[in-house]
Amino acid sequence: MSQRRKKQKRAGQGGGAVPSLSCIEPNAAGIDVGATEIFVAVPQDRDPSPVRSFETFTEDLQRLKNWLQQCGITTVAMESTGVYWIPLFQILEKAGMEVCLVNAQHVKHVPGRKSDVIDCQWLQYLHSVGLLRASFRPEERICAIRSLLRHRDSLVQMAAAHVQHMQKALTQMNLQLHHVLSDITGQSGLAILDAILAGERNPAVLAQLRPARVQASEEIITKSLVGDYQREHLFTLRQSLQAYRYYPSLITACDQEIEEQLQNLDSRTPPDASPLPPERYPHRPRKNEFRFDMRSELYRIYGTDLTAIPSINALTGYTVLAEVGTDWSKFRNGDAFASWTCLCPQNKKSGGKILSAHTRRSASRVNRALRLAAQTLERSTSYLGAYYRKMRARHGAPAAITAAAHKLARIIFHLVTTREAYDESLFAAEEQRQRKRMENKLKRTAKQLGYQLIPLRQTA
């Protein structure tokens, strides 16, 4: 018997028929996706072998699609397993089927036997009775930009790994240059490394390559360049430096591709809109920033300036664009969007008591970007900065970061859906209420201690 027939026979000997309840989706199928094999289950009355297995080659995926169409399937449920689901998802979506991509944590089978055949039957059953909810997935144009962003992040991380290799080689030679200079990949650091690899060993000569704006003195740099130059560590340093210098060209090419993909997105800025105002919170360009004006592109696509929000820069706005897209209608309101980013408490109750109110763990890039933005509010003089410091004093830094990130998510949702400009003056009333509460609290505290507060204007 051929290997394929053995698989078909094994698939046909599934875990038995799943008990049927009232069907909401009678034309539903369930798919268990693997790296080399895919199991598909259709309703019992659609085929003599309602469970079949297919390999993951493209022609096998096409056979899978044709079989589903012959069985009259219009909607399919599958788990988001790694990246293995993407080719099949695209084929079925192009065929006009509704693909319900579900979180694997939400469709765990009851304890007992577990196999690929039972998993696909379980997915088909849950989907047919309407118990599955599809995960959010943006449109195809946004998915393309998202893939480029994630690839760009990988390039930056790989370049950083080679910087660590250079630091390790310097440490093994007891050269403390990376402890004296804040960035060995800067102008002075690269000049010194090139001179070392060219054969220069005199610390005084190497220290003279330091530009005047470097804070470390020439004497300190000279001491940091006295070490034991070993051939094997110099070889490692040379290769790591060559590998590091290769990545900027890749990142530049990636930025060009991203810029071209952004041109495919429609502009939501009206023709008579005012030009983009100067950046409210200017900063020095960083080494890994985009090679094009990302702030202007975000303003054109969203119709509002997200960077006007304190702590939100162009990179954070681009992360939101790449992960969510331009169509936010799938979120009912700002609270629903904040819940999707896992910035809301997840109450677990039992016996009338709250067992836990911690936020869900998430690998969402929007969640991480907003949390990083919230941390920068510590010294901000804006209302959001005052809100962060108030929450930190009351609940601690971790809870303050979550609360500030939640507020940032709601503000971004409001700006994107209404295309209104960020207006700091709207928080003036809230600041007045907060000031009044603080004043009343001080008065109560002073009264308990036997004192009376007198405003300064009355003492003048």
Image (cartoon, rainbow, N blue to C red):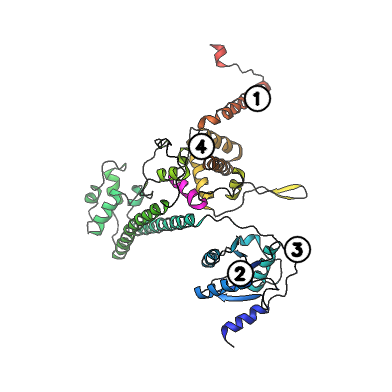
Mark 3 → mark 2, Cα distance in angstroms: 23 Å
Stretch in magenta: 314-329
> Earlier along the polypeptide chain: callout 2 or callout 1?
2
Q: Residue at x 57, y 34 (%)?
A: 390
Mark 2 → mark 1, Cα distance in angstroms: 63 Å
Using a 10 Å C-alpha cutoff, classify the residue at mark 2 as few (fewer than 14 neighbours), some (14 to 19) or many (20 or more).
many
Residue 445 disc label = 1
Using a 10 Å C-alpha cutoff, classify the residue at mark 1 as few (fewer than 14 neighbours), some (14 to 19) or many (20 or more).
some
Q: Nearer the viewer, mark 2 or mark 1?
A: 2
Viewer-closest of 78 and 272? 272
How would you classify the magenta stretch by its main secondary structure?
Answer: helix
User: What residue type is disc 4 on?
Assistant: Glu
Identify residue for label 3. 22
Viewer-closest of 207 and 326? 326
> Earlier along the polypeptide chain: callout 4 or callout 2?
2
Residue 420 disc label = 4
Q: Name the residue furthest bottom.
A: 1
Q: Name the residue furthest right.
A: 351
Mark 4 → mark 1, Cα distance in angstroms: 42 Å
Residue 32 disc label = 2
> Which element is circle 2 on?
strand
Mark 3 → mark 4, Cα distance in angstroms: 46 Å
Q: Nearer the viewer, mark 4 or mark 1?
A: 4
Mark 4 → mark 2, Cα distance in angstroms: 44 Å
> Which element is circle 3 on?
loop
User: What residue type is disc 3 on?
Assistant: Ser
User: What residue type is disc 1 on?
Assistant: Thr
